[in-house]
Image: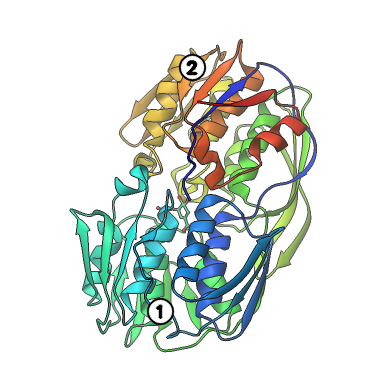
Amino acid sequence: MTSEHNKIYLVQPGGKLTGQFRMPGDKSISHRSIMLGSLAEGTTEVTGFLEGEDALATLASFRAMGVEIEGPKDGKVKIHGVGMHGLKAADKDIYLGNSGTSIRLLSGLLAGQAFDSTLTGDVSLSGRPMKRVTNPLAEMGANIDSQDGKPPLKINGGSKLKAINYTLPMASAQVKSCVLLAGLYAEGTTVVKEPAPTRDHTERMLQGMGYKVDVDGDTVTIEGGGKLTATSIDVPSDISSATFFMVGAAIAPGSDITLTHVGINPTRIGVINILRLMGADITLSNEKMTGGEPVADISVKYAALTGINIPEEQVPLAIDEFPAIFVAAACADGQTVLTGAEELRVKESDRIQAMADGLQILGVDAVATDDGIIINGGTIGSGEVESHGDHRIAMSFAMAALQAGGTIHINDCANVATSFPDFVTLAKEAGLEVDEIDG
Ligand code: S3P
């Protein structure tokens, strides 16, 4: 499932982004469609599924646990649900590649099964913190072995889970979802309180499949022992993937781009809010609901940007979008300051350091801080930067080339396939001069 060959992006300076595009399916919703569709009674039909490595890792893991899944073909997947107690032990370790969402959500779901499972991942995933999920799961009575809080995770099944009242120590939708999924199998009422709003796709999809979930401000409540009913799921385009094109259009004079059918769930639109505060020209049209999630067409035209202090309440709402937002900040007039974003240090890479290092190589005045970054906008030069195998770092530096003084050479880009397999093709069609070569 991991990308076997490394890739280098060579991106030529200049250009602008124009046209109308459909971005790939939402990664978070694609994962959840497979997980909940597998546990449902009946057949769930998914359209718009993200055929990227992360969501495919989740799909493969449920197939390995005995779920019959047809596709994906052209974004269509048919999941023959096995019911809440129909999963079977996989006959080998479950490899989840680069995918934090897969391992953290599966931990909760598998803690409540009668069988044992072992979850593994690539080098990046194997270095990521898992105590944030194993701690609450242990409180629920789960029996999980880790490597000092890191994967592989050996989930010893057969534990009788009990409901807990849990206040998340950090704003994390993965941890919230993990506890809620374990809560489906727990005796009693599980209550999760979050310090700030995070993406609520799990809650919405559970409700869409007929499961009672109470949401009261910062608190989500769910009772164990219910069942899920199959449904059809239309996965919107991923605002996190759209972000690269939004930022590209926002920084490159002459740009005018429209991204259709993008998910604009209020817990995901921090990037729109932040770019607008910087002066970006962003218009939403065709707003509607699909399968419990709001979507819209997003149009972005070039406009001069100004540096800002990013409001901390926007951080969880834009958590995956910061690498690209930093590129916008590098092109803005004045200083941009981000604080309260220490979670960025434990993503697919340390995104604060990776972006600060790369921006400095490109001649931008960017200084990493413990919980954020300070960027003084100016001109972007040229040079060779490292993506550290992080898809979002790679795509962000690719867009920086639109305003660069020379070629940007980006190493280690194969993992772009985890979330956006067609990135190079779509970016070229939109006007970015990017070539992908074997590294
Ligand atoms: C995700 C939650 C976020 C996000 C990740 C996807 C999800 O992670 O960064 O890309 O699908 O629940 P955290 O929960 O660690 O913030």
User: What is the distance, in whole Å, between disc 2 and disc 1 at their CAs?
Assistant: 47 Å
Front one among 341 and 72 = 72
Is tag 2's residue or tag 1's residue first in the polypeptide sequence?
Answer: 1
Q: Residues within 10 Å of mark 2 (few under 14, many from 20)?
A: some
Q: Quadrant of ligand 1?
A: bottom left
Judged left or right of residue 146, residue 33 is right
Q: Is residue 134 above or below residue 353?
A: below
Front one among 415 and 232 = 415
Structure colour scheme:
rainbow
Q: Is residue 325 visible?
A: no
Residue located 45% across and 84% down the image: 86
User: Circle 1 — which element?
Assistant: loop
Q: Which residue is mark 1?
A: 88
Q: Amino acid at mark 2?
A: Glu
How many numbered marks have been drawn onto this rendered protein structure? 2
Q: Amino acid at mark 1?
A: Lys
Q: Is residue 247 visible?
A: yes
Whole-percent x, y for residue 45 in the image: 67, 73
Q: Is residue 249 above or below residue 49?
A: above
Q: Is residue 14 above or below residue 412?
A: above
Judged left or right of residue 60, residue 135 is left
Whole-percent x, y for residue 92 in the image: 35, 65
Residue located 55% across and 11% down the image: 381
Residue located 56% across and 71% down the image: 204
Q: Which residue is mark 2?
A: 384
